[in-house]
Amino acid sequence: MAEPSKEQQQQQLSPVLGSGESKPRCDGSEREAGFLCGVVEGFYGRPWTTEQRKDLFRKMKQWGMDSYIYAPKDDYKHRAYWRELYTVEEADHLTGLISAAHEQNINFYYALSPGLDITYSSSKELATLKRKLDQVSQFGCKAFALLFDDIEPEMSKPDKEVFQSFAYAQVSVTNEVYNHLNCPRFLFCPTQYCSSRAVPTVKQSEYLNTLGSKLIGNIDILWTGEKVISKLLTVECIQEITEVLKRPPVIWDNLHANDYDQKRVFLGPYSGRSPEIIPLLRGVVTNPNCEFHANSIAIQTLAFWSKCSSDTKISSSVSSDIKLETENEDGICQEDAPAFLRSFRVTRKIARCPNKELCYDLFSYVWDIAAVLSMLSAYVKWLAMGNFPANINSYTQGGYTWFSKGWKETFTSGDQEPWVFRGGLVADLQRLIPLDVGNDLFLYKLPETSAVNLYTMRPYVYTDEAILLDVCNRTANDGEPVNLGSDTLKNVLADRYLGPFLTIAPQLCIVAENNRSEVVGYACAAMDTKTFLRNIEQCWAPEMCLKYPLSILENGVPPQEPPSSPTGTTAQANQLARDCILYFHNFKNDYPVAVLNTHPSILSTRILKPHLLEDDALGKRLVTVLLAMLRSNGSSSGVHVCIEQTDQFMYQFYSKLGFVELYREDGGDSVVYLGRNF
């Protein structure tokens, strides 16, 4: 059928643009009075599962809530492909979900978000919208919502020829759909859905005033408050929007929403809303955390709040008898750090509790927080040793830390939406580490299971020397062990690659431990490579020449055998030992000047391969702490490593830590220099 003319369209649409006070075609008797209270699944990200939703319905009934809004942004037939009808399989799923809600006396609101690309003036589009909602109505749904949030407030050219404003276009479609569905419970989400998005203000917004005067009076309008995520809801702001909309709003509350930030999860109660506003509202629905099992407190406390009277006293204090597992009666920790920093004992307790699903939802957050706390603990312990200059403040003040000028004031002012400060508690803790160029070091894959170890870090002590030498030997050949057989030569590789750091700059060494307090890796550095090399030349190399005389090459280390030889592994180890001995006896301080000028500090890191495979972020955390130590100890902001060109394992290892190639010597057996800034 051909599209009607623009004049015909305007004539067809004009009857539904009457006053909001006028009655629709039916008397609206199905719309029950009372306070609407429930949950809106309206976040971006992976939607909840069917079983989770059914569990929610049971809990909502138990807590006295009555409404659920189905509006997951990533259900593509809800938003991006709203025109498409549901398949038979999808229809069965929705029918079962709606029935499950009704069995618990929960009103199931099916929401559609057509605003991304709808042509409001098209009769075909309107017919498609009605057909989609009619299909869902056949599934047993009796309550609906049209959502026009998070879209551009612009009309297409055909719409501009029919409607005098964006608001008129939305009102026209909404009123028509409302009447077509024969007056069900109906919700409408405006494009200007909070005070901060009202243009120019709530009272002066032509858009909001049009909704108030033209949208059918029985249609409830959703509102988030003064902001998208409002810390407070006041009587004054509710009265203001009620006057403009000519009806009390239904609050779409994003207080516990975390879809804008993967590093956040909100476990606190419903707060910042005085019971005084309850009589001023049509209802409240909460749009909570994406993690389903993290929402019990948020949803249940909303249910309790909705039943409060205006004179109810709500306390936000925490019970004084709640203590950390490691606290004594005086509130003092009996260990150096909370237990979870070493072995995740707390998490394993959660895994055995009846609500262990919560462990799965929260484990990655706890692991991430524990990891950054471990870094901070190691850094603070290093500071306690006093191995830094008196003018440390001039080195550690960066542009993106908690102590940067204006950061704290902006954060605590409450003037910004929370997504301005991304990362939640983890990011706030990370900002205590004085690195300006280190954001990539905080990016790593979080564990998907609780069956992992949490590695901790601490400063090196002299009793660690033998263990670290062993770690170096066990990783010296492309991350694999090297067995030199002879007691005389067993540490020759470690004496070359690790010994100078432990002897000349032990204050810049950090070690990693597993949950059994076993050392599994280290990171060492020297602040100024020129000074470091001079000390090697004058002190360390002569000592090593005495320890490993050239006579060993004639008597104890045979020449390299062909790789095809059955003893090729031994031959390779012997060749590595020969190279180290010759290195000591022919030591040359001939570093490339270009490397030293741009990256004056030098670093060396080794981690036992099994532990590196279990936690591939361990290297990043070790290096992060070491770079913070370097930053606190001087003005260097560039560090480099020197590795054999044939050592592909260490090349890839440092590349993952953000090191890039700076200089490569000629010849296949020479070295390559990699560097990064911090």
Image: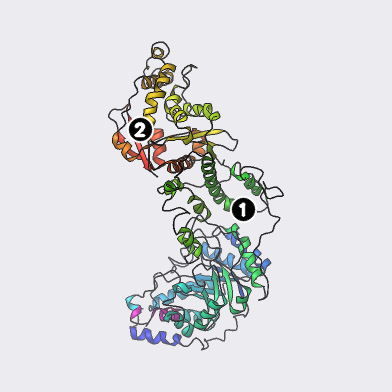
**Residue 5 image point, x, y percent:** 33, 83
Task: Look at label 1 and name its amino acid.
Answer: Glu
The residue beneath circle 1 is 357
In the image, residue 610 above or below residue 482: below
Label located before the other in sequence (2 or 1)? 1
Look at the image and say whether residue 314 sits in the magenta stretch: no
The furthest residue to the left: 666
The span picked out in magenta is 159-173
The furthest residue to the top: 555
Residue 530 is marked as 2
In the image, residue 566 above or below residue 393: above
Look at the image and say whether residue 171 sits in the magenta stretch: yes
Q: Which quarter of the image is occupied by the N terminus? A: bottom left
Give the image's coloring scheme: rainbow
Task: Look at label 2 and name its amino acid.
Answer: Lys
| Whether residue 470 can be seen here | yes
Residue drawn at point x = 48 percent, y = 17 percent: 485
Residue drawn at point x = 41 percent, y = 86 percent: 14
| Whether residue 2 can be seen here | no
